[in-house]
Image (cartoon, helix red, strand yellow):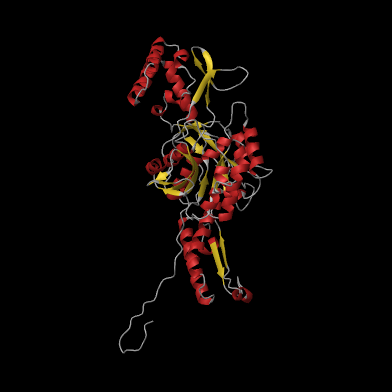
């Protein structure tokens, strides 16, 4: 109020409306892994969480995908594996060591399935490492010379999902070394949720073996802060134009491998060129495709291997799409996945029983299944804490994270305000308005607002005189979050003829 010393008319404005709670973003994943480059405006982005809004921005700052190399060899009958025929003889295609990296194509799957804003944390670059990158756990959780990525992420408030597609290249070693730390990080921040992959299932592996190793390795701590998806996906994300002879190991001699005479002449002519330029390489590739069906089949075999991807990137995109179209309270299940031709393993209805419901420890695994005439659908919506009545569903866990963080940010304005009835009424009204809007949108269950939520604050209700003396304002919020109809049972019964 102005000092009333001089006669006159004074104007004093007062706020008529209480502060409001604004819902925080719910689907902002942070992708952690290896990139070709990590630079913006001449400054390094290594180990720096960087916000991007499009795939074009990702390419501008972090580059293209890794040019993986493959070796082709005659099939060994003693070692089972996927084979293809060259001149009526079985051969195998094997990716070179340190060439397995998934972040770039996972980002492409993310944007193909509805992805939007996200964060990228590059833990290393491969642009200067043509022989590949050795994935190490210390790149993610730190060492004496490297920072702990999860400590850095604590300073970022926006990310709500954690995705580490490159980690699964470690196979089963990723579970206990990296995934458990992601779960611990999400529980510590109370604002994030982890999306996990299972190891790729080999020809000699069974689903039971793959699932058992995951459940044994993931432990029992903080399970309600993550969800696992299985199996891997056969995608169409890598286009035919992206795979050429450059994806063959230098040891592969096409002149002896290709049976076509014209193709052998083309290879011999190309080898005679001392330093072929880009145009010469492009013409060489096109000439081989035209002259050699065998070369084309080799390229397609390599492309099919590159297109088999862990599902976490696509799932992060689906989370974003469902959140934007329906809301975080809608279960991210019974939705189709774009750019996917089929799951790598076809899980049946009966086989899914033990994956969806783990009687022993509750470590549910969400299955991705094909449905004729419909497509490839995410057919599960449970967290890893699948036996918990409170936290078994992904949408329940993530909705409560959104409510908690939204109210937390809004109530910061009242820190050090008078801890009295006036403040209590204002805070309660603010939270009630927020929850009422959620109820109207369908996030909370109940025929009336009183049945959907309850907010309590005040002396004798949530606080004692001692609490007020100690500077504590205690608020109790109860919410009835909508839960998915996971099992629909229709009962049929015959009745007697009535007339």
Vertical order, 414 against 104 (above or below)? below
Pick whichever, 128 or 208, lies toward us.
128
> Is residue 90 visible in this depiction of the protein?
yes
Q: Whole-percent x and y of residue 246? A: 43, 25
Q: Whole-percent x and y of residue 346? A: 55, 31
Pick whichever, 485 or 402, lies toward us.
402
Pick whichever, 175 or 432, lies toward us.
175
Residue 227 vs residue 358: left or right? left
**Which residue occupies the extreme top position in the image?**
261
Vertical order, 143 against 457 (above or below)? above
The image quadrant that residue 468 belongs to is bottom right
> Is residue 486 visible in this depiction of the protein?
no
Residue 208 vs residue 428: left or right? right
The N terminus - image quarter: bottom left
Vertical order, 370 against 428 (above or below)? above
Q: Whole-percent x and y of residue 491? A: 59, 43
């Amino acid at each position: 109020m102005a000092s009333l010393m001089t006669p006159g008319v004074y104007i004093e404005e007062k706020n008529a409306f209480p502060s409001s709670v604004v819902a925080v973003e719910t689907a902002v994943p942070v992708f952690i892994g290896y990139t070709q480059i990590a630079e913006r405006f001449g400054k390094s982005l290594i180990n720096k969480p960087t916000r991007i809004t499009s795939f074009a921005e990702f390419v501008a700052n972090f580059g293209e995908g890794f040019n993986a190399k493959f070796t082709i060899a005659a099939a060994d009958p003693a070692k089972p594996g996927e084979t293809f025929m060259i001149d009526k003889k079985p051969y195998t295609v094997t990716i070179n060591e340190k060439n397995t990296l998934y972040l770039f194509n996972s980002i492409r799957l993310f944007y193909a399935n509805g992805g939007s804003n996200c964060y990228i944390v590059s833990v290393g670059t491969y642009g200067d490492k043509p022989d590949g990158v050795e994935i190490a756990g210390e790149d993610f959780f730190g060492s004496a010379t490297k920072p702990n990525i999860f400590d850095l992420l604590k300073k970022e408030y926006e990310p709500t999902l954690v995705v580490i597609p490159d980690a699964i290249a470690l196979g089963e070693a990723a579970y206990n070394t990296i995934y458990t730390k992601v779960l611990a990080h999400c529980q510590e921040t109370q604002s994030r949720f982890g999306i996990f992959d299972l190891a790729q299932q080999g020809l000699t592996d069974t689903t039971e073996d793959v699932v058992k190793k995951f459940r044994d390795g993931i432990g029992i701590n903080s399970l309600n802060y993550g969800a696992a998806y299985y199996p891997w996906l056969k995608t169409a994300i890598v286009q035919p134009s992206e795979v050429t002879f450059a994806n063959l190991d230098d040891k592969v001699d096409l002149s002896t491998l290709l049976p076509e005479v014209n193709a052998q002449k083309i290879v011999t002519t190309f080898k005679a060129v001392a330093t072929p330029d880009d145009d010469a390489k492009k013409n060489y590739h096109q000439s081989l495709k035209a002259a050699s069906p065998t070369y084309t089949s080799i390229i397609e075999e390599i492309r099919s291997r590159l297109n088999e991807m862990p599902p976490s990137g696509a799932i992060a995109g689906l989370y974003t799409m469902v959140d934007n179209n329906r809301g975080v309270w809608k279960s991210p299940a019974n939705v189709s996945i774009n750019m996917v031709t089929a799951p790598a393993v076809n899980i049946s209805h009966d086989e899914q029983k033990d994956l969806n419901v783990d009687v022993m420890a509750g470590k549910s695994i969400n299955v991705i299944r094909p449905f004729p005439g419909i497509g490839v659908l995410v057919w599960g919506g449970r967290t890893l804490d699948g036996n918990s009545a409170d936290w078994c569903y992904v949408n329940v866990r993530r909705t409560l994270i959104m409510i908690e963080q939204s109210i937390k940010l809004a109530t910061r304005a009242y820190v050090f305000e008078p801890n009295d009835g006036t403040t209590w009424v204002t805070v309660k009204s603010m939270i009630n308005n927020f929850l009422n809007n959620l109820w109207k949108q369908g996030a909370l269950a109940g025929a009336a607002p009183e049945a959907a939520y309850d907010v309590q604050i005040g002396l004798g209700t949530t606080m004692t005189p001692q609490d007020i003396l100690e500077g504590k304002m205690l608020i109790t919020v109860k919410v009835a979050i909508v839960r998915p109809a996971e099992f629909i049972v229709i009962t049929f019964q015959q009745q007697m003829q009535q007339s």
